[in-house]
Amino acid sequence: MATYTAEGIGGFTPSGVRWRGSGFYRTLPTGKLAFLNNAVGLFEVEVDMEGNFTEKIWEWK
C-alpha cells in the first residue's frame, strides 16, 4: 500500500475542469512499491462535462 498527499490549483474551462499540482508518495522502503517511497509527482487533471477523467503524472527527479 502507498499513500499520496497532493496540493493543486485549478478552475473551470469551457469544456469542464482542469487542475495542476504536485503529490508526495509514501510507502514501505521494501516490497513492490518501494520505488514510490519519497517520490514527488507533478500532475495535470482534466474532467469534461460528461465526467470523463484524464490524469497525467510526471515524476520529479
Image (spheres, rainbow, N blue to C red):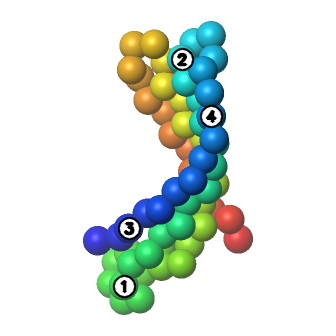
Q: Is residue 55 above or below residue 31?
A: above
Tag 1 residue: 28
Q: Is residue 28 above or below residue 3?
A: below
Tag 3 residue: 3
Contact between marks 2 and 4 (CB within 8 A): the answer is no
Label 3, label 4: how many angstroms apart (C-alpha)? 22 Å
Q: Amino acid at mark 4?
A: Gly
Quadrant location of the C terminus? bottom right
Whichever of labels 1 and 2 marks the residue nearer the N terminus, that label is 2
Tag 4 residue: 10
Contact between marks 4 and 1 (CB within 8 A): the answer is no
Label 2, label 4: how many angstroms apart (C-alpha)? 11 Å
Q: Is residue 55 above or below residue 41?
A: above
Tag 2 residue: 16
Frontmost of labels 2 and 4 is 4
The residue sitting at 56% across, 43% down in the picture is: 56
Q: Amino acid at mark 2?
A: Gly
Left or right of residue 56: residue 33: left
Secondary structure of the residue carrying numbered label 4: strand
Q: Amino acid at mark 1?
A: Leu
The residue sitting at 63% across, 41% down in the picture is: 9
Secondary structure of the residue carrying numbered label 2: strand
The residue sitting at 39% across, 78% down in the picture is: 27
Residue 52, position as x, y percentages in the image: 41, 23
Q: Amino acid at mark 3?
A: Thr
Whichever of labels 3 and 4 marks the residue nearer the N terminus, that label is 3
Label 2, label 3: how many angstroms apart (C-alpha)? 28 Å
Frontmost of labels 1 and 2 is 2
Mark 2, residues whose alpha carbon is within 10 Å: few (<14), some, or many (≥20)? some
Label 4, label 1: how many angstroms apart (C-alpha)? 31 Å
